[in-house]
Amino acid sequence: MIKDYQSQKELCDSYDFCIVGGGPAGITLALRLAGNGRRVLLVEGGGHEYSQNSQSLYKCPSSGLDVYAEEARLRYLGGTSNHWAGRCRPFERSDFTVGPPVHLPGWPIAFSEIERYLPAAMDILDLPPHSEFKAINATLDDTEFEADRFLLSPPTRFAQKYAKQLNETEGLDVFINCNCVDLEFDNKTGSIAAIVVSDYELHRERVIAKQLILATGAIENARHLLNSESLVNGGIVSKDGFVGRCFMEHLNVELGTFILKDGQSTDSRQYFTTDTFVMEHSSGKGNVSASLVSEVKSYGRMAAIKGFFENLICEAGEAQKIEFITKFNCPGDGVIGTLIEQFPNPNSRITLIEDRDALGMRKPTVHWELSPADRSTIKSIGLEVAKCFAKGGLGFVKLEACVYDEDLPLKVSPHAHHMGTTRMATSPEFGVVDENCKVFGVANLYVAGSSVFSTGGASNPTMPLLQLTLRLAEHLNRMS
């Protein structure tokens, strides 16, 4: 049953499983672990709907590249599935067999360990069974790029779809407005003895569970571990360790613009790097989308004014002569966007600052930076797309100078796909959790979600994180 912790302090004395975070991973775990005599607690820091009271706890400064953490994630029941667009693409075998060209290993598990959970993940995301991931256009070049293949979920809103089960599943307690504020590690037993939860009026309570799973997203999962003084004192978390490191995003790079040749279809095109391309260039993977602007769109408080002037200039044919504060594209312009893999980089990380939030937890800060290998990937993809466009007779591409000149600042923004920070590895030398998503050095603490990704690939993370969540649920069910 779903209860509001602000007004209903009705926690049980102990649970078999406690899951922190009511997003896709947390809800999926809770429903698969409850029942058969087990007691499961799912605590969600937000309520049923968006509230600034909860959302403001996502505020965190960033350095390097801007992550837009508060805008990218949603902190209420259902999590970021509440504004997810629904794009689904599974990982490929090569994501698990080819390690990144950096001084870190790739996945410690075989591709088959995630592949077998694909049908169940598709069912969760309301994708028709046995449906194929469809290519939407012809290839640019058989060896360099292929047509991207993906499916679109409706998209699934987890809080709405699973409301009945969350309320009626035997053995499951769901508390909203119930924030985890501390993990109490017992050095003698090597386990989490209890977690501390709080409402927004700072009423606190200890919760005891045999197994604890963090499922709060890449920034918050790392923050919970870093915030626990007992984990720090116990040597599980250290300044030089991997907790918080290797924060990854998918790169939305302004590659450039294009002009189609007469007679070419104006349909949007989406391409994906082949394994041959990745091996030849020692690069990451990437989606490249080429589409024509159909209308001028502007956002924010100045949208109406900005949109008026942009349309006026476009209609007058003077776009090349007038510079605006920000660049814009006129209808008919061809623009190239990307979703490019970022390699794991220990310098791209989550740390804590001394300032505390309204619940008394130290605030996180994100330093997001790219490595030379990332810049090389972007350059390789940009140059080869331009060549293939011309060679295929589609038209001509004008690349942004920063794509091929790595000394120039890169025009890049995030896709809101937070990954890494508690990466999966064979040992704490290279990660935070083992192949079963258990935190190294703690007997009963697990992590779910894309924060365990060893590498990010160029696939939207919702589907693969659910595959890993289903794998974790099976492992925990076998243990108990």
Image: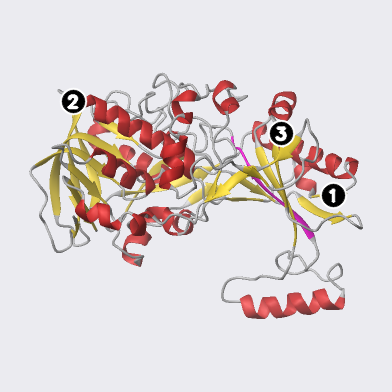
Segment tinted magenta in the rendering: 334-342
- Direction left: furthest residue: 13
Q: Quadrant of residue 89?
A: top right
Label 2 vs label 3, nearer the camera: 3
Q: Which mark is residue 187?
A: 2
- Few, some or many residues within 10 Å of mark 3 (<14, 14–19, 20+): some
- Few, some or many residues within 10 Å of mark 1 (<14, 14–19, 20+): many
Going by the numbered disc 3, the residue's amino acid type is: Ser
Between 66 and 266, the residue placed more toward the observer is 266
Q: Residue at x 18, y 25 (%)?
A: 187
In the image, is residue 340 part of the stretch drawn in magenta? yes
Going by the numbered disc 1, the residue's amino acid type is: Val
In the image, is residue 351 part of the stretch drawn in magenta? no
Check the image and report above or below for 100 versus 348.
above
Question: Element at badge 3?
Answer: helix
Label 2 vs label 1, nearer the camera: 1
Q: What secondary structure is the magenta-colored segment mainly? A: strand
Q: Earlier in the sequence, mark 2 or mark 3?
A: 2
Task: Look at mark 3 in the image and give the residue it sits on.
Answer: 376
Going by the numbered disc 2, the residue's amino acid type is: Asn
Q: Are marks 2 and 1 in contact (CB under 8 Å)?
A: no
Q: Earlier in the sequence, mark 3 or mark 1?
A: 3
Quarter the N terminus occupies = bottom left
Residue 302: x %, y % from top left? 61, 76
- Few, some or many residues within 10 Å of mark 2 (<14, 14–19, 20+): some
Task: Look at mark 1 in the image and give the residue it sits on.
Answer: 397
